[in-house]
Image: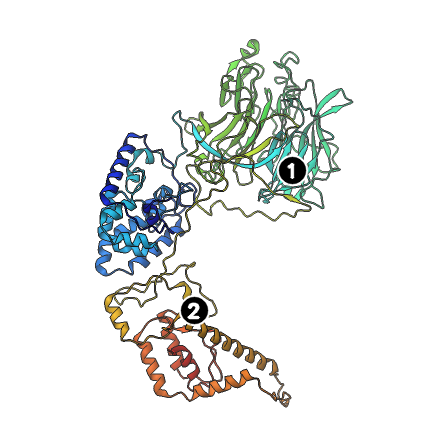
Amino acid sequence: MRSTRDAALHPGGASSSRWIPTRLRSFRLLLWVMLLARGRPAAAHPQCLDFEPPFQPPWHLEFCKQYEEFGCCDQQTDNAIAERYWDTVEQLEVEGQEICADMLKEVMCQECSPYAAHLYDAEDPYTPVRELPGLCFDFCTEFHSKCGHVVKYLSENKRLQDTAERDTSTFCTLMDLSDQDYCYPNVLKTQDLNGNLGQVVEDRKGCLQLCLTEVANGLRNPVLMLHSGDETHRMFIAEQLGFVWVYLHDGSRVEQPFLDMSGEVVTTPWLGDERGFLGMAFHPEYRVNGRFFIYYSIEVNNKVEKVRISEMKVSDHDMNMADPYSERVILEIEEPAANHNGGQLLFGLDGFLYIFTGDGGKAGDPFGKYGNAQNKSALLGKALRIDVDVSNSSARPYRIPADNPFIHDPGARPEVYAYGIRNMWRCSVDRGDPVSRYGRSRIFCGDVGQNRYEEIDIIVRGGNYGWRAKEGFECFDLKLCHDSSLKDVLPIFAYSHHVGKSVTGGYVYRGCESPNLNGLYLFGDFMNGRIMALEEDRTTGVWKERSVCMGDKKTCSFPGLINHHHKFIISFAEDEAGELYFLATSHPSTTSPSGTVFKFMDPSRRAPPEKCKRKPLPVKVKGKKLPFVPRELTVLETNEKPTRPPPKKMKLITKPPPTSRRVKSTTSATEVTTSATEGTTSATDTVALKWKSPEKKAKEKNTLKPWRKSKITNNRESTAQKKKIAQRQKSREQSKKTTVVKPVGEKDKVKPKAKQTATDNSKTNSLKASKRLKVSTIQSKKKIMNKTNSNVKGNRTMRNPLQVKRFHLDLLRPRVGPRTLLEGPGIVWPGNASDPPGGIWRRLFEV
């Protein structure tokens, strides 16, 4: 059962009228503060009222300027708060504005605070949300003395309004928060909360706490995920068995596979088998030519194993299916062992296809005097680069780029771009910084080590990456290692097998949704499931490790976030917008459907709303779509939703603007519905809070007001009036249909109707009666309208004072010509312009 305090602070509170004595409440408050002082310091957890992390606004804020560097408001929300503020200030007398205005603004701007969810009790889904932020006792005392009378405009909660009219102690006890670190303004002073506000959260060991969302599941050893770059934002996920699936932007999966190579691919159910469907890359012009390339293991005559690189095309009839008969073999390389098969395909920003092969398998690269990796005449243990944009009539399926480093070396294969590679597993191309383009086109790879070190390399033209002479930074083959001609390129980072035993290369984050991650290279280890990050010092070019771990329960307390993943990290991925993912499984077998795709999320800071919106091109799906059903347990249960409702709009009585102040619009797009054709404002959206001074109430007793009838009478009159207007419009449409435009000189062939309906008779009688209206009645009605600036009601619509004034000027101005349509729908002059418009006056001013 909720306390009386909760009932008073939250909308829809309990109806109990019992009140705890003030002294008892004060004692409990003091006891609670003492207990808090003994507890651990507050842990920073910035959170907005929409249950999302704060952000840095894209533009400066005009009203709540104190939160323009970091907070929960963009420019649109800031403007909405300003409108509500000015609407409230308009209700105050001049003296009240001078006393209360600054403090009122300070309180209303707490919706923009990065800790708004804590201030409004919104971080707990089981607690009703406050309508006012939690205020510390000293600040609340001052607020109550200056602005206590304003609470009735800030909240519609009757209990809270009544409490504001009582003593300060009662009001401030209700406004207090149980956690004194989060009440305002203490939340601004606590160093633990504001020390690294907006930065990636670190635990006590300095580990970056990230959270995840589940994107796909039920996959059998998902080895890669990539996009086609055609602006559809589809993701293609390949299983080691040889199936490639299409996942649409909404998370659903196309029922039929994009590609089925399971009949050609060599796979086994053994744990950790490295053979299978290993790589795939879409041509940079895939949207135009529909070409893509695949890398997989094959067996020839049940004896010889090879890796095959082939070109294929998308089907002409279905954009979500490949043409199974379009395969054209580009290259085949014999494998002397079952392991170290490489498997990475990618297109560089230069437009060429890069192929990364393993050293052939076994241990220590025992093939030949120097091994395959150091032998430039072998294609194993290399980074190859070829040009696949050749004409169909060409005899060879590819050609060698003119700037390949060993094209003129007779002892080297011209396809070789870099060598000295053991078994690079997963490489990526850096998109570059979104603003400066720094780092653009760099290729990062994770090279799996032998038995001591794992390493991360940046691939350069003609580079020798040391294997088998070196493993990481250390020597592996002493003779080769001390050879002065080695000249190997050192890795940017290496870690020992005390940390992990099989590196999985990743990506440099260049997305939009998590700005703090920009420039971090995220990668992982297959064997122990550890996620790591590297950060570059641009001045020295040195890369430093940043430990990454899953955030605790409090850090990831946002809807849909999880803080765990499967152990075996198979691959990393990047979508078309630059957001990062990784693919992991709990059982690394090609027959186990336990593979899941996770997306990285930074819980400390997000991008501004609307900034990262995507507009994918439409995708025509033939057949069924299978909706995504998450399986992983989120930190919050799936039925837990933010309790913070949208901020309520101020609904004030329309009153004439004071002569001493400028006329200012106080309505927003969601408050007022304006018709482009009618120029009117809906009455139901403008009347709510009723605040009038005693002098104004006394004046209104002696003033005749238009349209002051009971709701029932108004409803009946409006219904009857709508019927009359509909009948008039119907009769006008019928008269238009019977009117024929005749050529010059032709006689009128249209005959008048012989009979009139009862509706037409009543219309004629009402018009005749209106013409007989006395002029004195018209003048008296005009005097009444001059005395009041309240909205005029015509056809159940409200007009502001300026529109009303212009409306009457139009009525009194002499006109020439037949029937003239006025601003209101269905209101028409009853006759010629010289006739008195009695019908209109009667409808507008009838009491």
Tag 2 secondary structure: loop
Q: Is residue 113 above or below residue 224?
A: below
Q: Which residue is mark 1?
A: 245
Q: Nearer the viewer, residue 132 or 361?
A: 132
Name the kind of residue labelled 2 in the image: Thr
Q: Residues within 10 Å of mark 1 (few under 14, many from 20)?
A: many
Residue 831 visible in the snapshot:
no
Q: What is the x, y in percent for residue 361?
A: 65, 18
- What colour scheme governs how the chains and residues are painted in the rendered image of this protein? rainbow
Which is nearer the N-term, disc 2 or disc 1?
Answer: 1
Q: Residues within 10 Å of mark 2 (few under 14, many from 20)?
A: many
Nearer to us in this view, 502 or 706: 706
- Looking at the rendered structure, the secondary structure element under dot 1 is strand
Read off the residue under disc 2.
680
- Relative placement, left or right, of 39 versus 608 is left
Q: Which is nearer the eye, 672 or 814?
A: 672
Q: Quarter of the image containing the C terminus?
A: bottom left
Rendering coords of residue 94 (x, y %): 23, 60
Which of the numbered marks, if any, corresponds to residue 822? none
Location of the N terminus by quadrant is: top left
Q: Is residue 825 above or below residue 152?
A: below
